[in-house]
Image (spheres, rainbow, N blue to C red):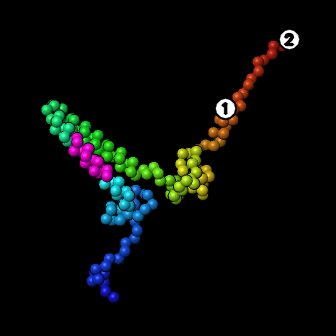
Amino acid sequence: MESSKETGCRAPEDPVLCINDCDFFGSAATMNMCSKCQKGMILLKQEHAKLAAAFSKDVVRRSSSSDESELALAGVAVASADLASQISQVKSKEGLKKCTACHKHVGLTGFSCKCGDLFCAVHHYSGKHNCPFDYRNAGQNAIAKVNPIFVAEKLSKI
């Protein structure tokens, strides 16, 4: 048998899940991201470059002011905050619905718990996912609200 160096073939690599946790496979060529996440990241970088270019033009126009360094620092902080928020929005993937316990894709059949999380059919019971919501207190409060206590006035003895 010939070695892989002689034939020029490479051994197939194990599939790697996307780093944005979107259930698709990534590759080393795309920085371990799937194609959709990579396109989103490229668009974010282009928008960031446009913001930086617009900011640099704005700084050049304001170069006559005495607070030039303060304006530059403030602008850089704002631009980096915008980039960080955009990256977090890409990673959040609002449309993607997964079970909080087992990370299984649930789609439209997911169950929302009173603790605020989303679960599959197996984990939607409060005992299966160690739910921190206090059902007993919630029930007692609901009953107390619906059935108020009435106290009659005392009668004076004759």
Closer to us: 67 or 153: 67
Residue named by callout 1 = 145
Q: In the rendered image of this protein, does residue 135 appear above or below residue 109?
A: above
Closer to us: 39 or 155: 39
Quadrant of the rendered structure where residue 144 is? top right
**Amino acid type of disc 2?**
Ile
Give the crowd class for mark 1: few <14, some 14-19, many >=20 residues within 10 Å. Answer: few
Q: Give the residue displayed 54% in from the left and 50% down from the top.
A: 118
Q: Residue furthest top?
A: 158
Instruction: Tell me if residue 119 can be seen.
Output: no
Q: Position of residue 98 (x, y in %)?
A: 51, 55
User: Dot 1: what SS?
Assistant: helix
Quadrant of the rendered structure where residue 79 is? top left
Quadrant of the rendered structure where residue 75 is? top left
Q: Main secondary structure of the magenta part?
A: helix
Q: CA distance from mark 2 to mark 1?
A: 37 Å
* Numbered disc in front, either 2 or 1: 1
User: Dot 2: what SS?
Assistant: loop
Instruction: Tell me if residue 86 can be seen.
Output: yes
Q: Position of residue 103 (x, y in %)?
A: 50, 57
Residue named by callout 2 = 158
Segment colored magenta: 43-55
**Amino acid type of disc 1?**
Lys
